[in-house]
Image (tube, rainbow, N blue to C red):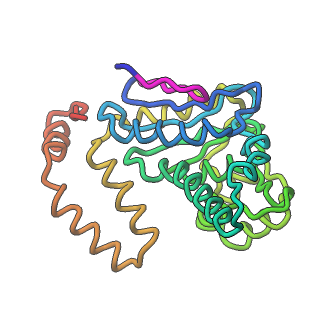
Amino acid sequence: MQTPGFSTLTITLSEHIAEVCLDRPDKSNAMNAAMWQEIRQAFDWVDSTPQARVAILSGAGKNFCAGIDLAMLAGVQQQIANPDGARSREALRRLILDLQDCLSSIERCRKPVLAAIQGACVGGALDLVTCCDMRYAAADAIFSIKEIDLGMVADVGTLQRLPRLIGDGMARELAYTGRNVDAAEAEKLGLVNRTFSTPATLSAEVRQLALGIAAKSPLATRGLKEVMNYSREHSVSDGLNYVATWNAAMLLSADLNESITAQQQRRLPKFAD
């Protein structure tokens, strides 16, 4: 099917897997103004396209992503300029909120998103991958919260999401120091699910994982993401109540019937998108 065209990233769709690839390799996929907006547009497309059951987020070239493009950062002052200081600061707040929303589109996307990370994943790129459902890395991957070295507070998601992945103490250590974390340490901390020896192996293995997810019930997979995201932000009792309501609406589905029938007939199930 026809996939949307972008200036800073590419999308392909095959075997129910949408691959969103950051595509500014000559700039280490640094996130310029266009890329932020196109990330949101891409994952809105993945969310709304029935044939896309799972997504892979990757980066072209040697590095996954070098974070926010410094040229974009340098232009913020001009972008928010206003004779009234209060209005200028309000404009900056709205800009930050919009950038946050661009990345949160990955979390809002009903389909699981797997990040495949090689080389540098620093600054805004770390904000980006913490929005994903799972993260996988090549052995050469390097992670860091670089904002402290720019004299600023990370403001588009890392400080909110990373502590849930690696614990509060380690997240604070990385935020305060800006030090590099290699792939082995990232796996030990729980930042990435698994590491692979080379970018090529990473790409192949993540696609195999995605194929496995794509073969499951799309309705159930979407429900898993919805319920797990909700439960992360609420108490256990709230989460149990929510999943009971979800399954009261979604449990008795064609996918359930197909799964049971396929098991009885000892064949692989086939699901509608």
Q: Position of residue 158 (x, y in %)?
A: 65, 60
The image quadrant where one finds the N terminus is top left
| Residue drawn 48% across the image and 43% down it | 113
Q: Nearer the viewer, residue 249 or 264?
A: 249
Quarter of the rendering containing residue 259: top left
Quarter of the rendering containing residue 265: top left
Q: Which residues are magenta?
A: 3-13
Q: Nearer the viewer, residue 21 or 42?
A: 42
Q: Position of residue 207 (x, y in %)?
A: 51, 31
Determine if residue 184 is in view.
no
Quarter of the rendering containing residue 43: top left
Q: Position of residue 49 (x, y in %)?
A: 33, 34
| Residue drawn 53% across the image and 36% down it | 38
Position above or below: 226 against 170: above
- Left or right: residue 124 compared with residue 3: right
- Left or right: residue 270 compared with residue 173: left
Asked if the magenta segment contains residue 6, the reply would be yes
Q: Nearer the viewer, residue 189 or 10?
A: 10
| Residue drawn 54% across the image and 35% down it | 206
| Residue drawn 27% across the image and 74% down it | 241
- As drawn, the residue found furthest toward the front would be 83
Asked if the magenta segment contains residue 122, the reply would be no
The image quadrant where one finds the C terminus is top left
Determine if residue 239 is in view.
yes
Q: Position of residue 262 (x, y in %)?
A: 18, 36
Number of marks in the image?
A: 0
